Amino acid sequence: MNPPAVKVKSTLAYLRKLFIMPDSPDKFIEFGHELLEMIHDFFQEKGGIHSSITLPELSRIFEQTAVPDEPVLIKDVLAEIRSKIIDHSVKVGSPYYIGHMTSAIPYFMILLEMIIAALNQNQVKIETAKASSFVERELVSWLHRLVFGRTDAFYKRHVQNPKVALGNVTSDGSLANLTALLVAREKAFPPDGIFPGLRMAGVEAAMRHYGYGRAVILVSTRGHYSIKKAAGVLGMGEENVLNIPVDANNRMDVRKLRLRVRRLCRPEEKTRIIAIVGIAGTTETGNVDELHKLGEICRETGAHFHVDACWGGAAMLVDEYRPLFKGIERADSVAVDAHKLLYCPMTMGLVLFRSEKDLQLIRHSSQYVIRRNSVDTGRFTIEGSRPFACLKPWASLKIIGKEGYGLLFRQARKLTGNLKDILDNCGNFETLNVPELFILTYRFIPERVREQLAAWGEALPDTDDKTSVKDMDRKIRKINRLINGLNVKLHKALRRDDTTFVSRTTLESTRYAPQNIVVLRAVLVNPLTSMQTLKEIVSTQNRIGLQLWRDFEPAYERMLKG
Ligand SMILES: Cc1ncc(COP(=O)(O)O)c(C=O)c1O
């Protein structure tokens, strides 16, 4: 419990001291130290990953419904932040936390965040962001070159050419995808004679003018939900995001894509394919679509080719990963998140356009900010005010460097392989995807059940008797449903145990396709995670899994017989 906060008599002199750093350097540094120590303690603290407080208890801490009346001292608010917030924050940097893309960050990022806050630059316009605008353009150029590899002359001409933008820094990957699809939509319905283009006339008029009944975006069933959100926001309709099934390796099934495209292009369909979205690092499984094949289909159909590389894009920094991204250089746009594989703290996305002309399609201006002939970055962005977030990847690409990222990714790949080996050797687990970018999906399944399913699975193709095929198939499905229930319970029990963390999803693309299989999902990017950590994580899951299995076993025995 914190001592009661000291009430402060607000005077303008007191408030000015809160603002004007030159007058109060001692306090600034004093609180700075305190703050850093508080953060340091958070990292040193042992105990649960999510803290033991329940959600209802947390809601009782934060149930004050009106703005506080009286000001209190900074030190009291810091104490409150410590006890009410930091103590109950999720330790996403813990080596035992291997469930999400949000993970450990290098300590220098905290210092960079301080610089970002202290400078308080607003990237929207040069009057509020001088050097930082140039940093942003430089970073965009680095990543543009990494992805598209255009000529030296191209980058020399455009790196600091304010008339064009090669990409936008966005607040996150969702906005990066939205920006790409906005551009794709404008390209699909451009001005034509007296028709001023979709941007001016709206969706309905654009469809009428071009004689279409529908406009669609194609992405695999592994597509991130931000693609659907974007379609909704853009007035295209979420139902017009068409999901193409994936193959056994969670990559868009190119044959099915071709068939779907062929059908959609029949004149009677009156359908415009705005964009085909390839994924370079699927959220659930970390797999990469065959981008070169998707690119070919885009060129044949005139669809915009967008690659959602929010998760995997940064792996392109390292030569050994580049073959995975074959064909990305022919994309029209690519989205990458810095707060994922670039190890930056929340949040910063980036969308890059192959052509320097594309962002002109969404260019805006106004009289009081981003004037038409200004050099303001905000002319090309959906967002208005934006922080100097690009400082984080800009600095880390220097501090960690390509070589350092190479080491981090190699370690991530090693950890992914280690986890797979530990699970395979344990016997009570089944791994369910072939990891490409550090994400492994698997489930708990007692050894004898796994072996039984495998035996039936192997027997199925050789069995001529239709009745026994049906019977085996029915049993496999029933048992899988039982194991799904077991894994949901296991995941909840692991959350209660709170010493380790993996996430959970449901996949239709495992070896049991098309049956939905509940899987545990591990994202192995924390360089502080070790082989020993992984052994402990699996041992905890195995112990709890076996305890829970006791309640499921009788049902399994009945299924075997029935
Ligand atoms: C493939 C992919 N695309 C887009 C996003 C959305 O990114 P953000 O959460 O930064 O908006 C994610 C997030 O996990 C992702 O994995």
Image (cartoon, rainbow, N blue to C red):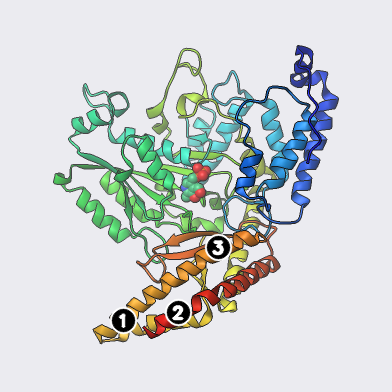
Whether residue 160 sits left or right of residue 356 in the image: it is: right
Q: Is residue 339 left or right of residue 18?
A: left
- Crowding near pointer 1: few (<14 within 10 Å), some, many (20+)? few
Q: Which mark is residue 491?
A: 3
In the image, residue 234 above or below residue 432: above
User: Disc 3 marks which amino acid?
Assistant: His
Residue at x 82%, y 18% (from the top left corner) = 23
Q: Secondary structure at mark 2?
A: helix
**SS assignment at label 3:** helix
Tell me which residue sits at (54%, 24%) in the image.
124
Task: Estimate the x, y position of residue 246 in percent, counting from the top left.
Answer: 36, 60
> Residue at label 2?
556
User: In which quadrant is the N terminus drawn?
Assistant: top right
Image quadrant assignment for residue 418? bottom right
Q: Is mark 3 within 8 Å of ligand 1?
A: no
Determine contact: label 2, label 3, CB under 8 Å: no
Label of residue 427 in the image: none
Give me the residue at 45% from left, 77% from top: 555
